[in-house]
Image: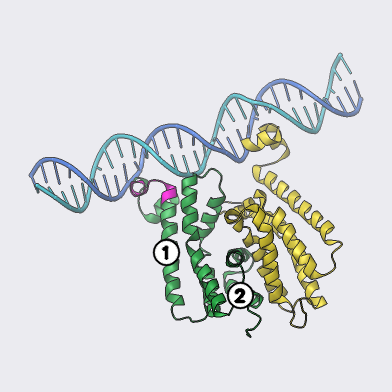
Chain colours: A green, B yellow, C blue, D cyan
Amino acid sequence: MDEIREAAGASKGSIYYHFKSKEELFLYILELTMLEWMNKWAAISAPLRTATDKLYALAEHFASDFQNPLMKAAEEFSGSETADPAVLARLMEITRAHYPIFRQLLEDGMESGEFERMDVDELLYVVLGLMGGLGVAYYELGAERIGPLYRRSIDILLRGIRSSGADG
Amino acid sequence: MDEIREAAGASKGSIYYHFKSKEELFLYILELTMLEWMNKWAAISAPLRTATDKLYALAEHFASDFQNPLMKAAEEFSGSETADPAVLARLMEITRAHYPIFRQLLEDGMESGEFERMDVDELLYVVLGLMGGLGVAYYELGAERIGPLYRRSIDILLRGIRSSGADG
DNA sequence: GCATTTATAGACCGGATAGTCGGTTTATAA
DNA sequence: TTATAAACCGACTATCCGGTCTATAAATGC
């Protein structure tokens, strides 16, 4: 709280006047961040036509913004045992907000014949897991090598789910 | 500490007689767990011939053991800012212990012609990221649906990296 | 100009918890 | 029996930190 207070240039009393608790403040900022991420994505994806192009762009967008400490904190928080269930539920709701974007993309790709038809939910979690998991490489490689890694992983993923008829 | 004390059936004084700090105790257990995991893997992988078979088995082994709270804690800890750099370094060292297993497997697969030749390090982080990332699906799906998800992700990965000549 | 609401400030509180310390028990050996 | 060391115990301490409280200042309305 003291760091937040200093960064905000406000007093503790003032912060607590506007936010019920540290948790509430956290969720508020998390939601704002997520909304911003989704808006950015809307702008990025608008001109893109194929699901393939969108998938590359989505991976890049994910890589650039999901590295922020907020998301790490959210993940960490979701594993905490002392956390209030209501807060946890709200956290999950915010975190899950971007699932439909991935889901829709995958469905579109299957519809257009770019991707092979398969269980969407299963594929969704594979993609989501891949995107989230690649983040740990951030500690190992630098920030500058993360982008190429995401792209490379999409190369592999695409080859793995591309329908047999299509050719790259 | 109080929970640890109770679970251990020992007193705080006794625990601190054997371990310098909570951190040290944590690292000790983490190392033990990692060693056990590697030993188990040695037993599992011994009879397996192809890199493909090994990859499926490794994914399963990863899924079953890396769900434990210890690994979550380790990851969480590695993101902590207050942590002592020396402790952090030791943590990373322990965590990285299983990298060579993955790396060797991938190299073997390329050598045998099962996998296409490519940058091993890059592929390593993709696979590592995928394995680690799928863990978050644990919260969404139950424990019983995690195994199939890991298998499915290997299906896709394999199709993505299989050398063009080979046929599945 | 006065009253009321809104906002800010920061000293203070209290629960939680990693770590300490003096003292006791148990095991080993002389 | 006695001496020494290894292991153990739990009350206590120091500190951190989220949250509260009271006092004030600024804005808003009549």
> From what the image shows, is residue D14 above or below residue A133?
above
Pinpoint residue A39: horizontal percent, then vertical percent: 41, 69
> From what the image shows, is residue B140 above or below residue A106?
above
Residue A109's mark? Answer: none
Give the letter of the chain under mark 2.
Answer: A
Pinpoint residue B101: horizontal percent, then vertical percent: 77, 64
Q: Magenta residues, as a range?
A: A14-24
Q: Which residue is drawn at 80% across and 58% down?
A: B41
Q: In which quarter of the image is residue A33?
A: bottom left
The reply to whether the magenta stretch includes residue B43 is: no
Residue type at tag 1:
Leu
Q: Quadrant of the C terminus of chain B?
A: bottom right
Q: Which residue is drawn at 72% across and 78% down?
A: B118
Choose between A145 and A102: the one closer to the eye: A102
Pinpoint residue A144: horizontal percent, then vertical percent: 57, 73
Choose between C6 and B48: the one closer to the eye: B48
The reply to whether the magenta stretch includes residue A23 is: yes
Residue type at tag 2:
Ile
Q: In this view, does A158 lie to the left or right of A64?
A: right
Q: Is residue B82 left or right of residue B57?
A: left
> From what the image shows, is residue B110 above or below residue A16?
below
Give the letter of the chain under mark 1.
Answer: A
Pinpoint residue B99: horizontal percent, then vertical percent: 73, 63
Disc 2: which residue:
A154
Is residue B86 something that shows in the picture? Answer: no
Label 1 crowd (10 A; few <14 / some 14-19 / many >=20): some
Whole-number angstrom distance, CA of label 2 to CA of label 1 = 24 Å
Q: Is residue B52 left or right of residue B95?
A: right
Disc 1: which residue:
A35
